[in-house]
């Protein structure tokens, strides 16, 4: 799921319900129908319009592993530009 920070918390619940239904899972402990979810996004960018993001829900803290990428691969050959971006 790309741009995870823009997705409303309620939509994650709908995704969980639908995947559980599609996978035929009838357990209360099967999150997202036991389907692995990769969520990518920048929580320092925009928030969902008129709603809270998944980051503010228990679903996020209980079922997602957070990995912070710290190396800017796109600008790693242009040190000046990379340093300028880091100061913003």
Image: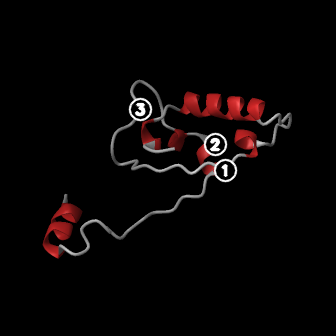
Please tell me which residue lies in front, 9 or 1: 1
Q: Secondary structure at mark 2?
A: helix
Its colouring scheme is secondary structure
Residue 80, numbered label: none
Instruction: Decide: few, some or many residues near mark 3? Use Cα within 10 Å; few <14, some 14-19, many ≥20.
Output: some
Provide residue 25's location: percent of width, then percent of height. Answer: 83, 36
- Residue located beneath label 3 in the image: 48
Q: How far separated are the C-alphas under marks 2 and 1?
A: 14 Å
* Position in image of residue 4 (x %, y %): 47, 43
- Residue 46 left/right relative to 39: left
**Residue 17 drawn above or below residue 79:** above
The dot on residue 59 is: 2
Q: Secondary structure at mark 1?
A: loop
Residue contact at pointers 1 and 3, CB within 8 angstroms: no
Q: Residue at x 85, y 37 (%)?
A: 27
Distance of label 1 from label 3 (alpha carbons): 23 Å
- For residue 36, the mark is 1
x and y percentages locating residue 14 in the rendered image = 63, 28
Answer with mark 2 or mark 1, whichever residue precedes in sequence.
1
Q: Earlier in the sequence, mark 1 or mark 3?
A: 1
Name the secondary structure under disc 3.
loop
Callout 1 environment at 10 Å: few (<14), some (14 to 19), or many (20+)? few
């Amino acid at each position: 799921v790309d741009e995870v920070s823009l997705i409303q918390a309620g939509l994650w619940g709908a995704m969980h319900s639908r995947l559980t239904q599609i996978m035929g899972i009838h357990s209360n402990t099967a999150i997202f129908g036991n389907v692995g979810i990769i969520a990518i996004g920048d929580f320092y960018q925009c928030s969902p319009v008129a709603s809270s993001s998944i980051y503010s829900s228990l679903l996020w803290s209980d079922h997602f592993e957070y990995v912070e990428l710290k190396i800017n691969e796109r600008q790693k050959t242009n040190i000046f530009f990379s340093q300028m971006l880091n100061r913003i």
